[in-house]
Image (tube, helix red, strand yellow):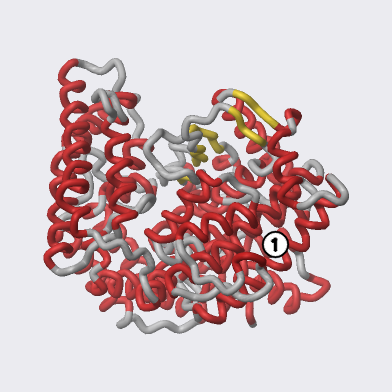
Amino acid sequence: MGVASNVDPIGFRGFEEVGGVNLEIVGLAEHHLERLTELDPTGSTARGTDGDEARLTDVSPDGISELDRLNRETLSKVTSIVVGNPTDKMLIDSMSERLNSQIELFESGVWMRDLNILFSPLQSMRLAFDLMAKTTEEEKFNFIKRVQSVPALIGQMISTLELGKSKGELASRRQAVECMRQARALAGDTGYGFFGRLMAGSSPSANAVQADAAKALQRFANYLEDEYLPSAPDRDGAGGAEWKLRCRQFNGMEFDPEDTYEWGWEELRLVQKEMDQIAAEISPGTPLQEVFRQLDNDEKLKITGEAEFLGWNQSVIDRAMAVLVQSHFDIPEAVQRCEAMLAPPGGAAAMYYTRPSSDLSRPGRTWYPTRGRSNFSLWNEMTVVYHESVPGHHLQLGLITYLGNRLNAFQRVLGQTSGLSEGWALYAESLMDELGLFPGPAFRLGMFSSQAFRSARVVVDIGLHHGYEIPDGWGRFSGERWTPDLAVDFMVEVTGLSREFMSSEIDRYLGVPAQATSYKLGHRVWREARFAAERSKGSAFDLKSFHMEALGLGFVGLDQLRSAFEG
């Protein structure tokens, strides 16, 4: 057992204390994780569970069908369990929802056109190699064996996409083009690409292995260009039916798109009002867009050099941890380490986080894609660091990892939704403002710019996939129907973030419907849960206790999070 088995008091109200452990639920969840670890070694690396790191997941039609069979078998057993208390019911509901969501996605056929800029098998493969250790001889052996399996993985990806072509299930041209570019970047123009960097200084035999992997990536890029793109449709929007499936997948809860679209506009107006007030503090009488430009050009708010910027990221993480560790959260010593990293080239523009391994030997890490930049404006970066590290993703995911077997396998690994995790991270941004931990109005404006960004995502994502019209009151955009180019213009104007970044973001929204909305929708439910707890407890309400109790639920759907504090 790793560090996660050591129990110390952290204010956790687990299912053992609420209604007793239902061993049937626990056993079934653990069995599902065990089988999933066998079938999905790539995902196991990302999840931090112990799997076969010498293999990559089989993403052929047969491999994906085997995963679907596992989901159906487990669901059949879950629904037969008789529960006797509210906690057990919450766990059953959460497990059933997750399994049903995966089954419905399989039945929809989206897996046969799984090309997008962030979450398709190409990016999952890259992430698995990013996370692998290469220190011991066994780790080096596993790494090389896994690299040897890249050509087979590429063959599986092509076979699945070819099946999709034969059935009329095709990714959009936009997503195929971007995956083609990413594959070429990973391969490297001279053969010294992603694997060459990871395996620099290796033996001649290892160099041959990485060269074969690079050739396979080039083969995949050529396949997309020569054989897939001629058939790929130009249409980007997924439509209402797929958006609904994806929304449930990313939230563990259903949302009405029309109501949510209207709510997103209301949220955006409120955040814009806050930004206008802070901008007036910084430069009275200056339009918001000009204040953004002033801050971008302020030399006191800039850092030059990737190493220097990485150091700044780490210092923000370390300071936040030092302030929050006792006063606002009970953070176990085992997860007080979070490493700032630079993301390898060939990915999307957004910063991301990877959770610790199950035994906590691999720490949580934030990954920042510089995309060739060497100059960094900090006023809108601090909130991103808080979002990805502390009190955002690292606090939540690190704590869940630490709790280990006090949570069942779905609560600690398999039940994760973007709405719960990204919603918490967005809530964490606003919490840092509530606690006064942004140093001055420029950084506070960065935080509200982030909130505007996430609110705008709601209307842009839903609008693009449903063909909705932009309402009155939004200047030159009013009355227009969403297009990708219009969405880029809108996001740049509303948030003050760069056009390059927003172009990548719009590609992301189009490739993964509803994922971008899960941040703000999750934030909405986290706020509702807090307000419900405040109403219920009155003067006895304690914010730290609420946070630890809610985080201690582990991974549940937004429906379960909301219901846990309603009564």
Identify whether 470 is placed above or below 280.
below
Give the quadrant of residue 70.
Answer: bottom left
Q: Nearer the viewer, residue 205 or 288?
A: 288
Identify whether 49 is placed above or below 65.
above
Question: Left or right: where does residue 257 sit relative to residue 414?
Answer: right
The residue that appears at 29% across and 15% down in the rendered structure is 201
SS type, badge 1: helix
Identify the amino acid type marked 1: Ser
Q: Where is residue 220 in the image (x, y as percent from the top left)?
A: 19, 43
Q: Position of residue 182 (x, y in %)?
A: 32, 41
* Residue behind mark 1: 545
Give the quadrant of residue 247.
Answer: bottom left
Q: If the image is split into quadrants, where does the N terminus sit?
A: top left
The residue that appears at 63% across and 71% down in the rendered structure is 265
Q: If the image is split into quadrants, where does the C terminus sit?
A: bottom right
Residue count near mark 1 (Cα–Cα under 10 Å), binned few <14, some 14–19, many ≥20: some
